[in-house]
Image (cartoon, rainbow, N blue to C red):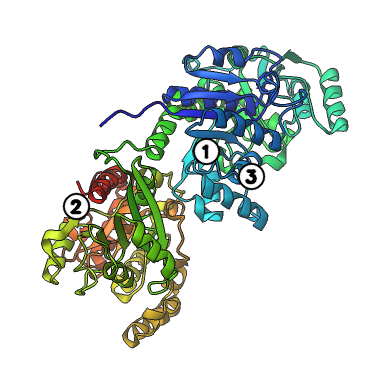
Amino acid sequence: MRAARPRRALVHAAAPLDRTGGASAWAETAVRALHAADCHVTLVLAAPARTGRLVDALTALDGVTVRHPHAEGLVEGDAPLTVAAAHRVLARIDGDHPHDLLLVRGRAVAAALADDGALRGRLWPYLADLPWNLDGFTPRVQGELRRIARAAPVLLCPSEDARCLLEQAVPDACGKTVLLPPTAVPPVPDAPPRTVALSPLRLVHTGRLAAGRNVPEMARLPARLAAEDVPAELHLVGDAFEDDDAELADRVRRALDHASGVVRYGGHARDAALTLAADADVGLAWRAPDRAADPEPSATLPEFGALGLPVLLNRTPAHEALLGADYPLFAATEDDAVSALRRAAREPAVYALAAARCRAAAADFGLDRAADRLRTALAKAFPVPTVPQSARALRLVVAGHDLAAFAPVLRHLAALPGVEVRVDRWPSPTAHDEQRSADLVAWADVVVCERSGPTAAWYARRRRARQRIIVRPRRLEPGGDVVAADRVVVPGPHHAARAAATGWPAARTVVIPEAVDAADLDRPKLPGAEYHLGLIGAIPSGERLDLAADVVEELRRRDPRYTLFVRTRLPWEDPRVWARPDERAHYELLFRRLAASPSLADGVVFDEPGRDTAVWLRRVGFVLSTADAEDVRAAPLAGMASGAVAVVRDRPGADTVYDRRWIHRDAGEMADAIEVIVNGGRWEQERRIGAAQARDARGLPEVCAAWEELVRGA
């Protein structure tokens, strides 16, 4: 197979690149990381470059082109590009030489490009301006983000919290998000462990002096610390204050003009700013109190941390995740800042702890890590075929009413060169647009029916000569709807044996496991996850929610912190389940038990199903699989890939999917295994072993390659 060619990336600089600040630093990061990931990059400036602070260094990189729309006459005047102007300029530049991807920062520009049909499927937005909580995702914001998510194969997010908020609020984003936090660029040399200097304490702030940056409050810090017998200086590396609020701008200028102990350097290129910062004792990334819920970590934290500097900043979920809830230099108010800095100056152990935490946090924010993340996303978005292509593009139809489990494979097949994919989504197992389905029959070379049943039967009755039909059944039951299929796909050898026993043609049965997107599922666990059990899917009764309740009830007798989270539709929400008298009787008895038991009433939580499984699994430390039969679903393996320890009920075929270490005879043995792992301090070790096994057994790249081979008929 031929090697992947370098991808062409078009990047929009959302801010002037001759101004020190987070947005200009992001543009430099994006260009350098894409370049390191083997892309040819074209950077489009948002405003005329009045200095060469960043532009000159980027232009010097082989394979990087910087476009100057104002100088090239692509836009009139010298004002920064508006959203509409940015759309016109980017579309013009891309139209001349089409790019593989367009990387833009912010919702406004991304939304404008998402509505451009010529750019759909190539948009990679960096969503740094998401709402800070779910309440902020109003219908208007959700609609805008839904349009963006549907137009974009990749959505870049600055933090895990921002990523999870987006996936919870906008299901279309699930499976597309890639973490790309602020990056320390250019790389800085390793600094030795620091000890604080008291003659004086040198504070440093880099970046633009703008609203929300606590500039007047920072300017007062040297005088206030001096009053506490802590000599201090404030070193400001950044451009003069610019803001639409003239009154606020004047207040900041007056504060700086009248402050004592403030040294101002003006704007500098990023590497020069870091050189100046390296001589300081404490970095300042402290913002106004209304920034406390910001899901994006400070862009200067990794840079200061790489220099060995401790950083004064706001307590936010993102910062707590990086530095720990007990980090000593969190500050909300000016009094908090003075108190924290005084303590750091006077207590060497506190200073050393803060410096060590920041240095450790910076380790995952280097340019090489950003390039690795983008390289992985590029490989997923632009797969290299593993099977030789035919002269004509293969026409593939994927049909069914529930394509969620097949979605990762479907995205891979649709991204392959030489494969044209169309989807026939049925609103229900029996309802569909017959004319559209008939048109697709006439068009397709290959039809994949997700689940057996009416969809497979409808296509089988109308198949054309030399047309291949592949069926992926949901349950292994006797029936004629798959007999006409060229291939029947089952997830494992146990299922293949069961299929043969029901009379399905063994020669046409293919084993391809259910895919697990380990890269997407591998996310940090939330505090307390080791006491949280998870069960995905609790209907029909054969999933044995009653046994899962037995497990958590036994555990709660020993430790009330254990809780069972059940992500499922409720039985009365499924007409096929609720219409069966035996099913209804089973659940009525079970829910009476859950309500009557104080332990279970407080220890079992039901969550609605959704596409944000990766978000939900962050709270789960043990994933249960209590079903009577080995099912085709990959839910327990998805839990393992997320870092949850599998607890599997012994049943026929379980040992063909799971290592025996995860399999237990009954609810009591399952509870014992969980308690031993937690109390023995083995949870971290066991979950890493399980994650590696899930990744190796059902990794998405290997499963996608198997499907590619199958649909091409190789």
Question: Which tag is nearer the camera, tag 1 or tag 2?
Answer: 1
Residue pointed to by mark 1: 124
Q: What residue do we see at 44% from left, 32% from top?
A: 374
Question: Which tag is nearer the camera, tag 1 or tag 3?
Answer: 1
Marks 1 and 3 in Cβ contact (< 8 Å)? no
Mark 2 or 3, nearer chain start:
3
- Which SS class for mark 3? loop
Q: Position of residue 392 (x, y in %)?
A: 31, 43
10 Å crowding of disc 3: few (<14), some (14-19), many (20+)? some
10 Å crowding of disc 1: few (<14), some (14-19), many (20+)? many
The disc placed on residue 267 is none
Residue pointed to by mark 3: 293
Q: Is residue 414 above or below residue 20?
A: below
The answer to which image quadrant residue 531 occupies is: bottom left
- Which SS class for mark 1? strand
Amino acid carrying label 1: it is Trp
Mark 1 or 3, nearer chain start:
1
